[in-house]
Image: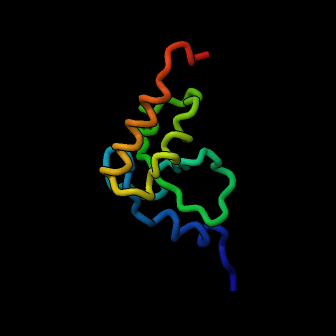
Amino acid sequence: MTISPSALWDDDHTRRVTCIACGETVDRGDAREYDKHGERWDREDKAFEYLCKPCDRACCHQPRDGLERTLVAAGAGRSDRRTFLRRYCELASADAEPGEES
Ligand SMILES: [Zn+2]
């Protein structure tokens, strides 16, 4: 009996995932992982979110100081959308002090 290493990946690659930016459903293999905690390599007990390739390309890959922290603090993925957006706006405007960019 032989198990080809690729068989281990099949499940992952045939899964359909939803892009968190545009809502498009794409094959898992065509999507990019997005970890809102920014610790992509710490995979234990993680559920990744996904971006389709066009959205991933459209993303800014420069460091986003504090954005992830703000999203997490606002309850991204844990609160309902309305609650999250309200909290996010509060946090984002509280953070938007002039002269904070380096
Ligand atoms: Zn997309």
Residue situated furthest top in the rendering: 99
The spot of residue 49 in percent (x, y) is 48, 54
- Residue 46 to residue 86: above or below: below
Q: Residue at x 35, y 44 (%)?
A: 85
Residue 87: quarter of image: top left
Circle count:
0
Q: Quadrant of the N terminus?
A: bottom right
Q: Residue at x 59, y 62 (%)?
A: 46
Residue situated furthest bottom in the rendering: 1
> Between 58 and 11, which is closer to the camera in this rendering?
58
Q: Residue at x 54, y 40 (%)?
A: 68
The spot of residue 22 in percent (x, y) is 32, 45
The spot of residue 32 in percent (x, y) is 50, 48
> Between 30 and 64, which is closer to the camera in this rendering?
64
Whether residue 44 sits left or right of residue 53 in the image: it is: right
Colour approach in the figure: rainbow
Q: Quadrant of the C terminus?
A: top right
Q: Residue at x 58, y 29 (%)?
A: 65
> Between 77 and 22, which is closer to the camera in this rendering?
77
- Residue 59 to residue 80: above or below: above
